[in-house]
Image (spheres, grey):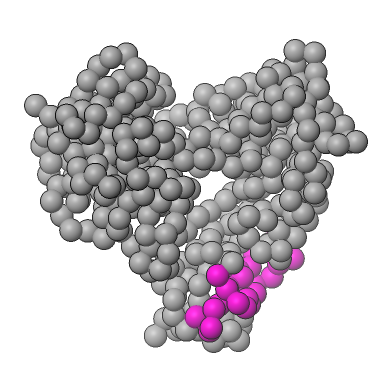
């Protein structure tokens, strides 16, 4: 008997399995994941898991016994080779076939790979999976100098953990400031100063031409500059895993194209998480998001609709990043604003930058300021007085009306 098959076993897939049972679905649920582990959370990998502050048990989306207890068929170490839409089935690389009534694709994303001279040397790592991080943790113990290629959130989170572990840390960024793709010059400057103040060497406007070493990496080559390193972490972005969907003839464009019900161009196939390009009715545009809240929200929406519901996915994007003792929480996209206002004290590492467009709140970057983050989630799209936002004496909840 066919049921619901989920391709992938990450955060979206783990949430989907739980949602299906929570909504009362009693049919077969099969999760097909190519990693060895049960569904787990990725954000802690570059933070608390990498540092050793938490173990595997704290990273899992649900305890391992959740799946057999809920009669969910979790198949790990299982890579799907193809989707047969005509016969409504998927086939794994080992030749097993699973029929489905509805299919959820939650294949996530993969690291962007650097294919340059020396990129096959030992000691060069990417950070995406538990196995990746276990390898990096082992390398930390014998490394002295680490070079992180890419000054995005992942790279900076690793830099913070590596610095606290006592390593000599260099971050190499090709653009003219760190975090350039995701935030404002003001926030880039704040984080640049935060890291350099802790002893991290940051090189901007610096491309990587290759790696040097005899079997194991010993240096990163950047034009005329050579950065010594016995450990390299590459974090230059991720790309959506759409190969299966494309091969099956589903519409793809910077991700698997879905509608506001998380439904693909095939009415019996849904998709959720990093791999999707979805419409956001609140922001009036299509987005491809790499975030846990998006993965979980889309999974819930897709499951409701696979079971006959009529649920629209419409959520304001939010994200977070932990670096040293600072928690950055973000709502919306700062690039949407035409003005900004600061509340709090940057020198005390506790402040929020609100971004407004035509007088309406469209984003916030909140550093160690959870109240401001929570209020912005409710203020999003609403008019707010800039002076009131900036005034620490103003009770933010009073702006909600």
Quadrant where the C terminus is found in the figure: bottom left
Left or right: residue 177 versus residue 238 is right
Extreme-right residue of the structure: 224
The residue at the point 35 percent across, 67 percent down is 281
Q: Position of residue 59 (x, y in %)?
A: 44, 35
Q: Nearer the viewer, residue 161 or 269?
A: 269
Residue 86 position (above or below residue 36): below
Q: Is residue 59 magenta?
A: no
Read off the magenta span: 336-360
Residue 174 position (above or below residue 74): below
Residue 10 position (above or below residue 120): below
Does the rendering let one see residue 123? no
Q: Nearer the viewer, residue 319 or 324?
A: 319
Quadrant where the N terminus is found in the figure: top left
Q: Position of residue 105 (x, y in %)?
A: 32, 38
Q: Nearer the viewer, residue 300 or 60?
A: 300
Query: In terms of image quadrants, where is residue 103?
Result: top left
Does the rendering let one see residue 56? yes
Q: Position of residue 232 (x, y in %)?
A: 71, 29
Q: Position of residue 90 (x, y in %)?
A: 25, 26
Left or right: residue 373 versus residue 6 is right
The residue at the point 17 percent across, 29 percent down is 87
The residue at the point 28 percent across, 29 percent down is 83
Left or right: residue 395 versus residue 12 is right
Query: In terms of image quadrants, where is residue 224?
Result: top right
Left or right: residue 130 versus residue 270 is right
Count numbered badges in the picture: 0
Q: Nearer the viewer, residue 110 or 292?
A: 110
The residue at the point 75 percent across, 12 percent down is 215
Q: Main secondary structure of the magenta part?
A: strand
Q: Is residue 340 magenta?
A: yes
């Amino acid at each position: 008997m066919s049921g619901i098959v989920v391709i992938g076993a990450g955060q979206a897939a783990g949430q989907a399995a739980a949602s299906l049972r929570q909504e009362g679905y009693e049919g077969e649920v099969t999760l097909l994941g190519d990693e060895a582990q049960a569904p787990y959370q990725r954000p802690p990998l570059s933070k608390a898991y990498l540092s050793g502050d938490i173990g595997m048990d704290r990273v899992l989306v649900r305890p391992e016994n959740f799946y057999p207890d809920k009669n969910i068929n979790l198949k790990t170490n299982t890579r799907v080779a193809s989707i047969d839409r005509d016969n409504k089935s998927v086939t794994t690389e080992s030749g097993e076939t699973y029929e489905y009534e509805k299919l959820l694709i939650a294949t996530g994303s993969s690291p962007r790979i650097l294919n340059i001279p020396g990129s096959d040397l030992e000691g060069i790592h990417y950070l995406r999976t538990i196995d990746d991080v276990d390898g990096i943790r082992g390398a930390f113990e014998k490394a002295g100098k680490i070079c992180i290629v890419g000054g995005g959130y992942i790279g900076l989170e690793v830099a913070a953990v590596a610095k606290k572990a006592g390593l000599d840390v260099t971050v190499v960024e090709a653009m003219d400031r760190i975090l350039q793709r995701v935030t404002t010059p003001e926030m880039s400057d704040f984080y640049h100063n935060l890291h350099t103040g802790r002893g991290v060497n940051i090189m901007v406007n610096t491309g990587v031409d290759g790696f040097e070493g005899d079997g194991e990496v010993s240096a990163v080559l950047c034009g005329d500059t050579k950065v010594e390193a016995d450990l390299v972490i590459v974090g230059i972005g991720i790309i959506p895993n759409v190969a299966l969907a494309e091969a099956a003839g589903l519409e793809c464009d910077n991700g698997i194209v879905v509608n506001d019900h998380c439904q693909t161009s095939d009415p019996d196939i849904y998709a959720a998480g990093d791999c999707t390009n979805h419409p956001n009715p609140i922001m009036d545009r299509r987005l491809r998001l790499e975030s846990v809240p998006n993965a979980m929200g889309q999974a819930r929406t897709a499951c409701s609709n696979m079971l006959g519901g009529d649920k629209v996915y419409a959520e304001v994007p939010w994200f977070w990043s932990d670096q040293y003792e600072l928690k950055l929480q973000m709502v919306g996209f700062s690039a949407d604003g035409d003005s900004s206002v600061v509340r709090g004290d940057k020198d005390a590492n506790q402040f929020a930058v609100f971004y407004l467009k035509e007088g309406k709140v469209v984003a916030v970057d909140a550093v160690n300021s959870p109240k401001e983050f929570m209020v912005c989630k409710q203020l999003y799209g609403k008019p707010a007085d800039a002076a009131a936002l900036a005034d620490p004496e103003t009770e933010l909840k009073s702006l909600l009306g």
